[in-house]
Image (tube, helix red, strand yellow):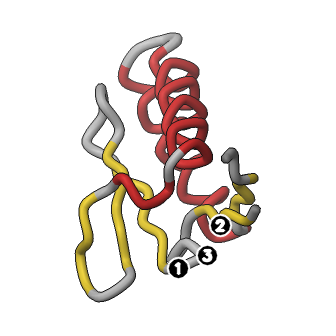
Amino acid sequence: MMFSVRVRSEARNDLEDAALWYEAQRTGLGDEFLDEVELTFDKIASDPNAYRVLLRDTRRAMLQRFPFGLSNTGHHCRRGCSYAQ
């Protein structure tokens, strides 16, 4: 079953800030970061419970190439995405 992923405005701002920082480090790196974020959202949509539990029902999906994680709690991610059937 696939879930839909919605990004909260606070998280969108964090992602945009991170992408701008990576872009300042190397041209194109910001886009690579956002591609990795999208890939991680797809993985969360496929299986939101596959990620390590941090505290009670809070889980974090780490990006593969960047030191950045997307945390979620139940059906609503903390400063991140949310997912629903």
Q: Which badge, 1 or 2, is on the more N-terminal residue?
A: 1
Residue appearing at x 42%, y 60% in the figure: 49
User: Quick check: 20 left or right of 67?
Assistant: right
Which secondary structure lies at badge 3? loop
Q: CA distance from mark 1 to mark 2?
A: 8 Å
Q: Position of residue 79 (x, y in %)?
A: 54, 73
Q: Residue flagged by tag 3: what amino acid is it? A: His
Residue under numbered circle 1: 74
Q: Residue flagged by tag 2: what amino acid is it? A: Ser
Residue under numbered circle 3: 75
Tags 1 and 2 touching, CB below 8 Å? no
**Residue placed most toward the observer, 19 or 40:** 40
The answer to whether 74 is drawn above or below residue 5 in the figure is: below
Disc assigned to residue 82:
2
Q: Position of residue 34 (x, y in %)?
A: 56, 31
Q: Which badge, 2 or 3, is on the more N-terminal residue?
A: 3
